Image (cartoon, rainbow, N blue to C red):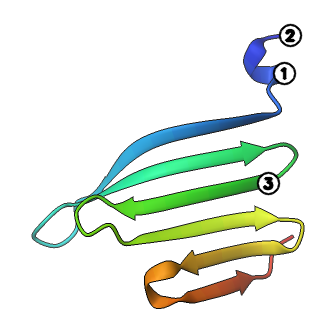
Amino acid sequence: MDKVEKAESYKAKAKMVFNTGETPQEYDVEVWHMKPHFYRVHLKHAEDKQSQMIIRNDEGVFVLTPALNKSFRFQSD
């Protein structure tokens, strides 16, 4: 069995650019995943440092926006 197939979890980093509007918006992205279905995605704006997190745990899927001091829970299967 291949190392990737045996992995129980992983962490990845990336840069994402949205080319909408007049100025491209760049985000730093970190993704954590743990089998069977848990994850955390952290998006941070490269310039103004605002961020948002999407979290999937046993209780559901949540979107956290620290700058607004808000969290939202979504129904998921």
Residue in the picture at 79% in, 26% down: 7
Distance Cα–Cα, label 3 vs label 2: 23 Å
As drawn, the residue found furthest toward the top would be 1
Amino acid type, label 1: Lys
- Asked if disc 2 and disc 1 are in contact, CB closer than 8 Å, the reply is yes
- Against 45, residue 14 (above or below) is above
What amino acid type is highlighted by mark number 3? Phe
Which corner quadrant holds the C terminus?
bottom right
Name the residue rendered at 40%, 62% in the picture: 44
- Residue at which label 3 appears: 38
Check residue 6 in the rendering and tell me which mark sits there, or answer none. Answer: 1
For marks 2 and 1, the one nearer the N-term is: 2
The residue singled out by tag 2 in the image is: 1
Picture quadrant of residue 38 = bottom right
Q: Callout 3: helix, strand or loop?
A: strand
Residue 36 at x, y percent in the picture: 88, 46
Position of residue 61 relative to residue 18, above or below, is below
Q: Is residue 32 left or right of residue 46?
A: right
Instruction: Residue 46: give x, y in percent of width and height.
Output: 28, 58
